Image: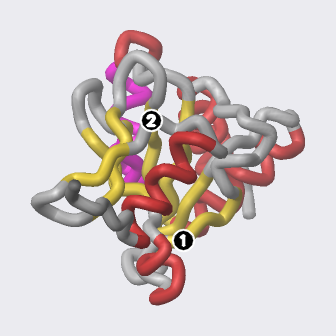
Amino acid sequence: MTAFTETALERHCRRYREKDLLPAVVDPASMRILLHVGATYGAVTMPTELGEQVLTQLRTAEIAGPVFAHPRSRRWTFLTGPTRHDEFTATAAAELFRLYTTVAGTGSQIVLPSAEDEVSGYRLWVAGPDALGTRPPQHAVIDAARESARSPR
């Protein structure tokens, strides 16, 4: 009988699946924890300063969800409801482009923070996935980003 020893990466991924209900998987090639974007989850990534404003708006509206930071690149990723590119216009897409904000496409994967990432500060949670188990609708994050960019700071 072969003994199976679970790695720290696998334990962290299992915690995402069991405790946080995120259908994460470990990618054996990159040794990263991945979340597939599509029918259940979406992601919007933006500069940190804009992300701070968006998170404030979402908290005020009581629809904030999980957010993680990429400190070295000074960007935040918001986990959202499903990606629905038909929900925003070409004008909105152009505005997001000017804001350095990207919407993960259906079928893409995002990398979630691992224990090693969190210790090193490479990728870490700003608002953890257990934030009431909620995810804001993707259009709410997009609208908040667009509104924050228009309002004076």
User: Residue 32: which quarter of the image?
Assistant: bottom left
| Residue 53 on image: x %, y % | 70, 56
The colour scheme of the drawn protein is secondary structure
User: In terms of sequence position, does the residue under pointer 2 or pointer 1 come before the other?
Assistant: 2
View extreme (front): residue: 1
Secondary structure state at the residue bearing disc 2: loop
Q: Which residue is mark 2?
A: 23
- Label 2 Cα neighbours within 10 Å, binned few <14 / some 14-19 / many ≥20: some
Q: CA distance from mark 2 to mark 1?
A: 18 Å
Vertical comparison of 104 with 75: above or below: above
Residue located at (39% from left, 25% from top): 91
Q: Which residue is mark 1?
A: 124
Is any part of residue 89 visible from this angle?
Answer: no
Q: Is residue 65 magenta?
A: no
Region in magenta = 90-102
Q: What's under tag 2, amino acid-wise? A: Pro
